[in-house]
Amino acid sequence: MRYNLPLSNTLYLKNLNFYLKLAEDNLISFKQQNEEFTQRLINEEAGNDWLDEGSHLNNIEWLFLNSIYATLYASFEHFLYKVAITLEHQPGINIKLNDIAGKGILAQYTRYLYLVGNIASASRELATWGRMTHYQNVRNLLAHNGGIMQDKAQKTLEKHKDFNFLKNEDVVMAGSLGLIRIRNKKILESFIKETTLLTGNILKEFNQKFPVQVDATQ
């Protein structure tokens, strides 16, 4: 299958902005709910389930934003899949995407674009890809390890390979095990900014090398 990559890119960018706006709107809503709940506690108007409600309000923010982050990452991967599979169907391309191995599907897509399509901007050696390993690690921890950074409390959390990255992105790492809790949109904005630069460079180079796309879908 070939994709109409300019159209796919337009939809991809719109979706990223939608997810960020969704995060912003819900952060405002969560803050308002917490303020209203606190006021009811002060006025002694909270119901019998106030403890459960308080726990819900205390956790809903990071649970929601963690999910938004995972969605952003999945969208990035899927867009690169579209570019890679479109490359696979270009005239003169005889090597299939599944013929290329990689440590994870993101590595597979970028290696295919770089090695088979000669898309230089897909090289993970470039400085523009420098922080992607951290973004990928965070996604994997959220998806496969419940967002927990380490399994043993005896280890020093500050020595974790992603600690400084998350600290700089203002992400909470709770407890000695480092439970990742995204509490604001900073890392979401950083991810969007950096990955749209990557996809933009790849798409520009792809269109220069393979300018004709026919019978394409979005």
Image (cartoon, grey):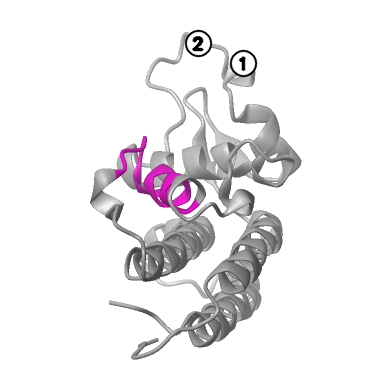
Splitting the image into 4 quarters, where does residue 30 fall? bottom right
The quadrant of the image that shows the C terminus is bottom left
Residue 25, horizontal then vertical, whole percent:
62, 81
Give SS at disc 1.
helix
Residue 193, horizontal then vertical, whole percent:
71, 62
The quadrant of the image that shows the N terminus is bottom left
In the rendered view, tell whether residue 149 sits above or below residue 138: above
Tag 2: amino acid? Lys
User: Is residue 196 something one can see in this rendering?
Assistant: yes
Give SS at disc 2.
loop
**In front here: 214 or 152?**
214
Q: Residue furthest bottom?
A: 215
**Residue numbers of the magenta segment:** 100-113
Residue at x-position 70% and y-position 56%: 190
**In front here: 161 or 116?**
116
Residue 89, horizontal then vertical, whole percent:
32, 70
Tag 1: amino acid? Lys
Residue at x-position 60% and y-position 62%: 202
Q: Report the Cα–Cα distance between label 2 and label 1.
A: 8 Å
* Residue 196 relative to residue 174: left or right: right
In the rendered view, tell whether residue 124 sits above or below residue 81: above
Mark 2 lies on residue: 155
Splitting the image into 4 quarters, where does residue 79 fall? bottom left
Q: Residue 159, which numbered label?
A: 1
Q: Is residue 149 magenta?
A: no
**In front here: 5 or 78?**
5
User: Is residue 40 something one can see in this rendering?
Assistant: no
Instruction: For the residues labelled 2 and 1, say whether their Cβ atoms are less than 8 Å apart.
Output: yes
Residue at x-position 69% and y-position 56%: 194
In the rendered view, tell whether residue 183 sits above or below residue 40: above
Q: Nearer the viewer, mark 2 or mark 1?
A: 1
Mark 1, Cα crowd under 10 Å, few <14 / some 14-19 / many 20+, is few
